[in-house]
Image (cartoon, grey):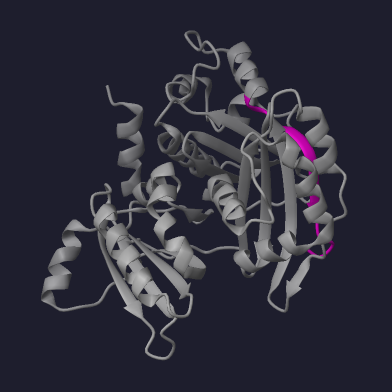
């Protein structure tokens, strides 16, 4: 009998679905580009910190190689590129506490950074490069997106403060959606699950510019300051290092997005939070991604859009459902084509429900436990 992980791994050989505009699970190689702006006069300090970091990264599973480049026009501008066997091992490392500790020596000499991640689609070179491709996976086809970048932040608040925090987060004036000529905020959806907060944003254009734009708005800054006393992880937004560490740990990247060919502006938005067993977050996200992909062609499927966010053992599935959640089949909403897949799903969950006998009751119970409470969902008028 094949295991869940074997079935998920085997599915990588299938042609990518045209419904999937974003995924880290196709097995192709990953190129990471980090643009770095170094403080004037700190170039040597930066080089020494990089060499220390480079030695540590070399032992990280999935890491292949890296390069450090300095601008020929501006000595303060540097470029770090790295290659990884695939996206999942990179994401596991970059979202870890180990990574937070590794990059600390760089902070004193760096003014600003920007990280970009790319799947390798095509590669050119001589005979040696062509021969090497046999053992390295290239992305089979380009993804066709909708121009929207999806990202989320997650953090926890002190138990007992949930109602207060929800009230603060729901009561604010929406920031101006226009960031610049090419960037706009499209939608912000905020949910809570117990004491965990998840804020999902949709942006057209430059995500980093949009996040910085939002952070500068007085109404948003006031809300952030108001919830500070209730956060489980302390932060000082007036201290750049404290704010940077907080938002680094809060980042909840989108790892998979599926859009069905059908569209319905009346679809309702929901979020499901799946607490994974320790060390199983990426496997759980991949299992849900494959099931979402397989269901996208079914015209009976009420889930019109699904975005998976994952960091460590936190997996969140943001879905737009035609007709609302109550009228939908719990198995379909959970990302299952039938109830028999419930056992596969719950082998990766952290003991949330008894599935020894999969039935409608266990499906409904799991959906109840995973469903997040909507705090606010705001769309810009022309999104």
Residue stretch rendered in magenta on the structure: 370-383
Q: Is 1 located above or below residue 383 in the figure?
A: above
Residue 22 pos. (x, y %): 50, 55
**In-front residue for pair 202/59:** 59
Q: Residue furthest top?
A: 357
Horizontal and vertical percent for residue 341?
47, 24
Residue at 61% across, 38% down: 233
Q: Is residue 148 magenta?
A: no
Which x, y percent locates residue 127?
Answer: 11, 75
Q: Compare residues 91 and 17 and report the one nearer the observer.
A: 91
Q: State whether residue 373 is above or below residue 174.
A: above
Judge left or right: residue 196 versus residue 164: left
Please name the residue shown 30% across and 62% down the image.
83
For the question of whether residue 259 can be seen, the reply is no
Q: Is residue 211 above or below residue 72?
A: above
Who's the residue at 45% across and 72% down the image?
Answer: 35
Residue drawn where x is 74% and y is 37% of the image: 229
x and y percentages locating residue 172 in the rendered image: 86, 49
Residue furthest out toward the bottom: 73
Picture quarter with the C terminus: bottom right
Q: Nearer the viewer, residue 277 or 257?
A: 277
Is 82 left, or right, of 255 in this rendering? left
């Amino acid at each position: 009998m094949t295991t869940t992980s074997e079935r998920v791994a085997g599915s990588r050989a299938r042609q990518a679905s045209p419904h999937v505009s974003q995924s880290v699970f196709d097995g192709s190689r990953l190129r990471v580009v980090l643009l770095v702006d170094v403080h004037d006069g700190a170039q040597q300090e930066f080089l020494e910190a990089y060499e220390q970091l480079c030695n540590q990264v070399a032992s990280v599973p999935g890491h292949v190689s890296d390069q450090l480049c300095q601008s020929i026009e501006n000595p303060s501008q540097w470029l770090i590129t790295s290659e990884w066997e695939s996206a999942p091992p990179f994401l596991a490392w970059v979202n870890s506490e180990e990574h937070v500790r590794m990059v600390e020596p760089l902070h004193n000499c760096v003014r600003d950074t920007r990280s970009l991640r790319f799947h390798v689609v095509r590669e050119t070179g001589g005979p040696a490069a062509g021969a090497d491709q046999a053992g390295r996976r290239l992305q089979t086809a380009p993804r066709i997106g909708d121009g929207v970048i999806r990202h989320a932040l997650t953090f926890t608040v002190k138990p007992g403060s949930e109602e207060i925090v929800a009230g603060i987060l729901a009561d604010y004036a929406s920031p101006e959606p226009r960031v610049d000529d090419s960037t706009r905020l499209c939608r912000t959806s905020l949910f809570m699950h117990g004491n965990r907060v998840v804020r999902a944003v949709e942006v057209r254009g430059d995500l980093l510019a949009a996040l910085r734009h939002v952070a500068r708005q007085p109404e948003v800054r006031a809300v952030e300051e108001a919830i500070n006393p209730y956060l489980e992880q302390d932060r000082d937004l007036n201290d750049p290092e404290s704010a940077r560490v907080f938002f680094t740990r809060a980042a909840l990247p989108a790892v998979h997005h599926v859009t069905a060919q059908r569209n319905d502006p009346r679809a309702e938005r929901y979020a499901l939070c799946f607490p994974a067993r320790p060390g199983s977050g990426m496997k759980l996200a991949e299992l849900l991604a494959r099931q979402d992909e397989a269901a996208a062609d079914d015209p009976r499927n009420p889930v019109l859009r699904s975005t998976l966010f994952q960091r460590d053992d936190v997996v969140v599935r943001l879905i737009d459902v035609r007709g609302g959640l109550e009228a939908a089949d719990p198995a379909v909403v959970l990302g299952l084509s039938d109830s028999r897949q419930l056992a596969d799903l719950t082998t990766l969950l952290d003991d949330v429900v008894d599935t020894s006998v999969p039935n409608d009751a266990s499906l409904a119970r799991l959906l109840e436990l995973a469903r997040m409470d909507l705090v606010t969902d705001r769309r810009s008028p022309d999104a």
